[in-house]
Image: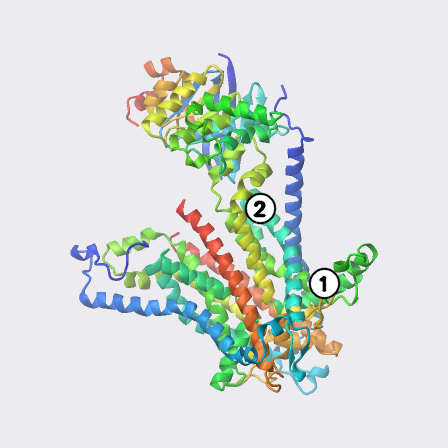
Amino acid sequence: MDAHIQVKNLNVHYGKQQALKNINIDIPKNQITVIMGPSGCGKTTLLKTFNRFLELTDGTQITGEVLLDGQNIYDRDVDVTEVRKVVGLLAQRPSPLPMSIYDNIAYGMHIHKMKRDRKEYKAAVRHYLEIAGLWEEVHKRLHDPATSLSIGQQQRLCLARGLAVEPEIILGDEPTSALDPISSQNIESRLLDLKDQYTTVIVTHTLRQAKRLADYVIYMYLGEVIEAGPAKEVFSNPQHERTKAYLEGQI
Amino acid sequence: MSQVDPGNSPQPIQKVTGRLTRPVTASRARQNNLAQRTFFIFTLLPVLLILIVTVALLFRSWPIFNAYPLKDLLFGQVWKPNDGLFGFRPFILGTFWVTAVGVVLAVPACILVSIYLAEYAHNKTRSIAKPVLDLLAAIPPVVYGVWGLLAIVPFVDKVLAPLSGRWLDSVSIFAVNQPTGFGILSAGIVLAVMIAPLIISVMFEIFSTVPNDLRHASLAVGATQWQTIRNIILPQVGPGIIAAVVLGASRALGETIAVLMVVGNIPQIPTSIFDSAYPLPALIANNYGEMMSIPLYDAALLSAALVLLAVILIFNILSMLVIQRMLRRKWAS
Amino acid sequence: MGFLKKKRWQRRHLMEAFMKFIMQVSLVFVAGALGLILWIIVVRGLPALSWDMVTKIPEGGYYMGKGGGILNAILGSLYLASGGTLLAMLFSIPIAMYLKTYLGDSKWGRYVRLSLDVLWGIPSIVYGAFGFTLMIALGIRASLLAGILVLALIELPIMTRAMDEVIRRMPVDLEHAALALGSTKFEVALRVVTRQMLPGITTAILLGFGRGIGDAASVLFTAGYTDRIPTSLMRPTASLPLAVFFQLGSPYPEVQQRGYAAALILTVIVLAVSLGSRWLSARLNKYTIK
């Protein structure tokens, strides 16, 4: 397996409470990895170690390594903003920035000064809106506030905003949990379309979504990884009792 | 909670008469009603108080408004109560200068500190900064005055004035015309420290109304924290920041004892921050003793208090409306 | 490899470091101001501080540098501030309770809070002037009573808002539980809220007291100044802030020194009250449901 992210001996503490216990996993390149498990098992915590979002919470201690293409993102001389540029995040609730639709997409590109002139920005904004399947719906009102969009549209906008800074990895923290079924389906199909180009890691609370999306599965329980492997194998033949129980809906 | 009219609405619980519940008897309901009415009268008090203070001052200063047109009072240059001349202009300008210098000195530092506390600082730093600000706010004005007298006045006299004399003498607002140390700059420095805790704590509250989702959305695409603050957070809190500054200014406007001790108290039209001035509150405080002996003097001084009150009321109401609205936004989301 | 390495020379990283630096400098500045104030007050006040200062009233020739102390001002200030706090409490507790139990975030509640905040912002010199007009109207002379009345006005909004803020954080569940058990709103206010209010009330009392004892501009008009310890509400009384103020105005260096000492005494009292309220409310909070 061609691992894009390697997690080695990762431990996370919130104050005195241990949230992640000695995690060791590999996440395959250009596939969709789904992290699942009952709520409170640490799946979002694990996800947020990948873009160093955990350290935004006061009092978290992180030990161990998260290697991105072999480089530990927790190294002292690593630029955290560079990590977050390479590792995009699609949040649980859509969070459009308080600016126009156009500016939302251009925001990250401006931050990193990725384009030279207005024309290039315009073209890029269009490109990413098209990828997110939003161009048709919004191209006539690019300068309306992003909050005027529906929740489902907002989430696709956030996807486009994340893609616009040219990440290699997309993290999704239950990205459809706030959406209606049709919008959810829309997001899911975007993610499936994109999986050849991006390494995607999704946290989900619904087993059905996991089954629809996953190429690779990580099952967590109480801060530990119980089982990890290709989706087909894990779903059809789980090795661990806990995983089996979860898949059968007992947990 | 708000849409229910609490006291009078029949409570559905009344019908439940389980063992653990006491039925709401008529007497207890009456007690509730009576209490509600009494309490209500109490809440009228703050609103009434503002009115009463204003009306009382207006009433007492009426004679002077009758004797002189408002224009002569506000823009009159000469203050000679013995000759019947009551020109407030030097005092109004003095108040303005002192407040302006205080606010200009305080605001940049306050913005930076509140951003730091709201966006960067760890809980530990915050838990140290909070009591420091509380203590600064708790120190009485007269102690600030002593500090100003012992530290700031000599500092202005021995350090700042010579420096300014050497480099900035040609700029009129920095010209050193009366080298004593007592003056607008000293008062402004003291005021800046006095109003800082209030401005910082209001700004901190305002910053914490910005939902974390927005911060995270910006950080997630790789923005630095300052880029996030600059591009996302500051545009959201603009009105609140301005309101905090106005609130701070209104505190500075009314400060009496501390300013009086370091400002020099010379009724003149100031032209430089090193000049002495004579702000309105100092005028009132310094002359209360003798004001009964000269005709119209007390009315003049109380009208000064009224002018001060009017400006401060306007500043306060406007800024508090903005701040309350912004803080409610946090509760709502 | 190394594609994530920090590019320190990049403008945005320089900006980040610079902004953070000047923020920290500002914070040090503000904290330093507090340190500087306390240091100066202690250094200049301590040498003149003596046992006589706090145990004696001014003797003949005190204001020319002869013996005596400022017990009159210390006691006067304690009387003034205690009286003001007590009187303000009589009104602020019902208002805060009503705000919580009946008004919540309703429109009238908002008006009341706004007017309290506005009252808070009115400078004490204006309260002093107002008190003075009242005294003239009622024919009262400068006295302990007048001082207490004006201080109560000043402290009322501070205390009410302080209580209001503390009670606001009280969980609604508890209140609903009490209502669900068949209590009327008034009973909720009386039992549950009062118990929960305890930390708020103590905080408010100490906050109001601290503000009251330090205020000079209002008592200047209303309480007067005397070398004697007041024996009745109708007598004028000295106060610490004014003791500082008047002694500093003296041409005698010894008297000025005593002014610094008086400032030190006042500062110690105010800081003790402020730190005490912090400590107390932290302790009391342990015994209430958060």
Same-chain status of marks 2 and 1: yes
Decide: few, some or many residues near mark 1? Use Cα within 10 Å; few <14, some 14-19, many ≥20: many
User: Looking at the image, which is closer to me, A74 or A244?
Assistant: A74
Q: Is residue A58 left or right of residue B3?
A: right
Residue ID at (62%, 25%) = A116
Residue position marked by numbered label 2 in the rendering: B115
> Looking at the image, can residue C28 be seen?
yes
What chain does badge 1 belong to?
Answer: B
User: Residue at the spot x=50%, y=51% of the render?
Assistant: B205
For the C terminus of chain B, the image quarter is: top left
Question: Label 2's element?
Answer: helix
Q: How far from the left and from the top, in percent, is residue A1?
A: 48, 12
- Identity of the amino acid at label 2? Ile
Q: Secondary structure at mark 1?
A: helix
Q: x%, y% of residue A136?
A: 42, 24
Q: From the viewer's side, name the closer residue of B244 and A58.
A: B244
Question: Which of the two labelled residues, at mark 2 and mark 1, occupies the earlier sequence position?
Answer: 2
- Left-right relation of C171 to B281: left
Asked if residue A183 lies left or right of residue B104, the reply is left
Label 1, on which residue? B152
In the rendered view, would you say A198 is above or below C30? above
Q: Residue furthest top?
A: A1
Percent from the top left, x then y, of residue B80?
A: 68, 80
**Labelled disc at residue C17:** none
